């Protein structure tokens, strides 16, 4: 079993707030009635910021350490990998993944799974650091030096991971969003 870098930094991560709440609200077409799945949701940083916009939020993450720092009275944490999500087809009104796609083992399987659990009419939003920018290139080098399993993809490459739905990308200030409507 490989070292879980995120368990080690979870106490710090739990103190960081999410600054792109307004962008996520608009891009994910929030508020919405129903359930939202935050894949690779970690300590619930993003979920906490958008909690008011949806009835229920479930956080799925491979790291027990990260999930242990999420407020369990507010969110349902589920320990599981994005490549094989433990949910039925067409279960969530919204699925989001923030700052996590570059950490997963299999990008294609993760996108396929997130799309599978999304309801028809729902929206999947993948937010990633934009690897085309200088600052993010430096982060990618730092993560390699820390032996993290990061593999950043350009927005076009993320779009190509999935051959379904209505796809769109947006980019601003070193962040990119891939939006898939089912
Ligand atoms: C940089 S953190 C981001 C956490 C959260 N989305 C946020 O923005 O605060 C990346 C997260 O992805 C999780 N992760 C990595 N690979 C994963 C996988 N295959 N499935 C689910 N979660 C994964 C890590 O455990 C970690 O919590």
Image (cartoon, helix red, strand yellow):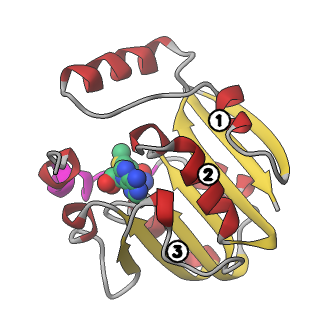
Residue located beneath label 1 in the image: 158
The residues tagged by marks 2 and 3 sit, at their Cα atoms, a distance apart of 23 Å
The answer as to whether callout 3 falls within 8 Å of ligand 1 is: no
Q: Earlier in the sequence, mark 1 or mark 3?
A: 3
Q: Secondary structure at mark 3?
A: helix
Q: Secondary structure at mark 1?
A: helix
Residue 130, percent from left and from top: 55, 26
Residue plotted at (55% across, 28% down): 153
The nearer-to-camera label among 2 and 3 is 2
The residues tagged by marks 2 and 1 sit, at their Cα atoms, a distance apart of 9 Å
Residue 88, percent from left and from top: 61, 81
Is 76 above or below relative to 82?
below
Q: Earlier in the sequence, mark 2 or mark 1?
A: 2
The nearer-to-camera label among 1 and 3 is 1
Residue 162, percent from left and from top: 72, 45
Marks 2 and 1 close (CB-CB < 8 Å): yes
Q: Nearer the viewer, residue 103 or 17?
A: 103
Q: Is residue 56 left or right of residue 123?
A: left
Is 16 above or below relative to 182?
above
Task: Judge whether residue 12 is colored magenta.
Answer: yes
Q: Earlier in the sequence, mark 2 or mark 3?
A: 3
Q: Is residue 174 left or right of residue 139?
A: right
Task: Judge whether residue 39 is colored magenta.
Answer: no
Residue 133, percent from left and from top: 53, 15
What stretch of residues is rendered in magenta? 9-18
Q: Is residue 81 left or right of residue 14?
A: right
Is 23 above or below relative to 77?
above
């Amino acid at each position: 079993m490989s070292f879980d870098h995120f368990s080690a930094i979870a106490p710090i991560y739990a103190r960081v707030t999410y600054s792109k709440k307004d962008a996520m609200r608009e891009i994910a077409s929030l508020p919405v009635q129903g359930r939202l799945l935050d894949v690779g949701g970690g300590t619930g940083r993003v979920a906490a910021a958008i909690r008011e916009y949806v009835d229920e939020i479930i956080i799925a993450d491979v790291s027990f350490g990260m999930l242990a720092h999420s407020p369990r009275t507010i969110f349902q944490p589920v320990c599981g990998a994005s490549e094989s999500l433990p949910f039925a087809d067409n279960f969530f009104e919204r699925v989001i993944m923030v700052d996590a796609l570059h950490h997963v083992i299999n990008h294609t399987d993760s996108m396929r799974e997130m799309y599978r659990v999304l309801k028809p009419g729902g929206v999947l939003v993948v937010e990633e650091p934009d690897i085309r920018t200088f600052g993010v290139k430096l982060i990618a080098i730092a993560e390699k030096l820390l032996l993290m399993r990061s593999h950043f993809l350009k927005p076009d490459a993320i779009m190509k991971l999935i051959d379904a739905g209505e796809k769109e990308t947006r980019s601003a200030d070193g962040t990119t969003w891939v939006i898939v409507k089912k």
